[in-house]
Structure formats: structure tokens, C-alpha cells
Image (cartoon, rainbow, N blue to C red):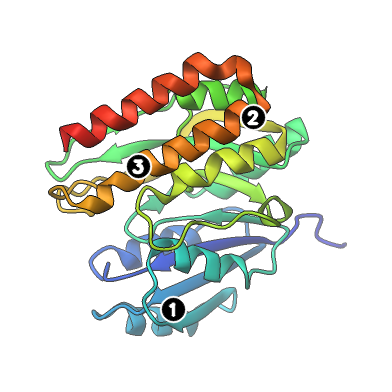
Amino acid sequence: MKNSFPLISVVLPIYNVEKYLSTCIESVLSQTYRELEIILVDDGATDSCPAICEEYLKKDNRIVVYHKINGGLSDARNYGLERCKGEYVTFIDSDDYIDPDYVMYLYNILKKYNTKMSICQHEVHYDNGHVKDLGKQGDEKLDSKICLERMLYHDVIDTSAWAKLYRVDLFENVRYPKGKIFEDIGTTYKLMIASKEIACGYESKYHYIFHENSIVNSSFSMKKMDMIDMTDQMAEDVLNIYPELKRAVHRRQVYARFSTLNQ
């Protein structure tokens, strides 16, 4: 009997996360959804990550490994995206991990509502051991306007690249901006617009590891201004399509400025 499940590509951009990488990869290998292509993109890591990738390559024939010159998170995501063979793709940051039914959950709600994109919630794990669960029960279908509005108001839906499943053709004219931080601010809204309808699941299936010393949480540099630049571009694009979201867009622009000033 022919397997009715489509191939889903899981892209892991990897750079100097040797402490967390095995946990992340193991969580992908343990997925209840088995039709996976697992793409490990070593973005010029200088620790033991390249060797860890090669070891896992020997363990599972679903794994593909690429070693490339360092180009940053966006470049690594794009690199995996441009080489994936799946009908759908999901991104996982390689210092995070996922529940065993993460892919199945996202795929099931996507098929339930016949959409090109689905979203789940996540838990935040802090360095002090505290865990913040942002999930609850239920799921629903949202049109892109409502989804964008809720994202602009930080109402459960966020801009992160991860904790989402996308049909690959959504990326036909979309790439992550190379050399930028807060890169998903400049990308996720475009995918929501292209999808037109989004399946939104409220259960937490993704585990985000919050690092005090990460780029986003580190001391201020001019790179932090990327948040304002990309938020303003998002504002312009959203208002061109949904001018009635002016209040929500302005709220997000104000947030970006206070957040940057707070840094």
C-alpha cells in the first residue's frame, strides 16, 4: 500500500551549539511522523558540531548534511530551503528541541483546514530552570488579515520562523534576509500573506531555549536597529494590502522602537 504521507523537510541551521545539538537532532529523529528529510546545515561551525553532524549522518538515512562557509542564520536557512525535496518544510533552531508529535500535529491541522501554513505554540526554557508554557487547547483557521493583526498585537501568534509548517511553494519569492538579526520579522508576515489562510494550533509542541548571552539578548550594538528597519518594511507591505490594520501596524512600530531603546 502506498504511503499517503508527503515528504516533509526539517531544516536545522547549525553554528557552535555543540552543547545542545544532539538533543535537538534526537528530538527530530523521534518524530511520530516518519516521512522526513532532515537537513543539517553546518554554517561554518568552529566547535564539534561538524563532527556531530557526520556521526548522525551514519545513523539515519533520512539525514542530509551540508557544510558551508559561515553566512549567518538566514543564509543557513535559505541554503537548506533551496536544497530541500519535501512538499512541506519546517525550521528548527539547533539549540532548541521539539515534542515527538510536533511534525504530525502541524501536518494534521494543516490538512484539517486545507491551508498552506500551520502554527503551534511553544514553551520557553530559561537558564535558571524556569519553564513558561505559552500553550493551551484547541485549533482554528484564520485568514491572513486576522493572523497578521494578532501577530502585530503579539496576541499568541508571533513572527518566529520555527513552530510553523509551510508548503514549500510559499517560498517561491521569499527568502530570509542575509546578514540581519530579527530576520523572521522580515519574512513570516510575507508567508502569512501568501498562504491566505493559516491553521493555528494552540498546543505547545516546540521548546525554545532562552539564552541570556544570545545575540538578541546581548548588549546593544547597531545591529539591533535591524528590528526597526524590518518592522517598518513589514508595516509598509501590510498597509498596502490591509490599510484597515493601521492601528495594529503602528502599535508594532512603537513596540519595535521601545524595545530597541530598552536595549
Q: CA distance from mark 2 to mark 3?
A: 20 Å
Image x and y of residue 67, in percent: 44, 83
User: Under tag 2, what secondary structure?
Assistant: helix
Can residue 137 be seen?
no
User: Under tag 3, what secondary structure?
Assistant: helix
Tell me if label 2 and label 3 are in contact, CB under 8 Å.
no
User: Disc 2 marks which residue?
Assistant: 240
User: Disc 3 marks which residue?
Assistant: 227
Please give the label number shown on residue 56.
1
User: Under tag 1, what secondary structure?
Assistant: helix
Marks 2 and 1, the one that precedes in the sequence? 1
Q: Quadrant of the C terminus?
A: top left
Q: Quadrant of the N terminus?
A: bottom right
Q: CA distance from mark 2 to mark 1?
A: 46 Å
Say if 65 sits above or below 239 in the image. Answer: below
- Residue at figure coordinates x 70%, y 39% from the top left: 195
For the residue pair 14 and 79, the one nearer the viewer reads as 79
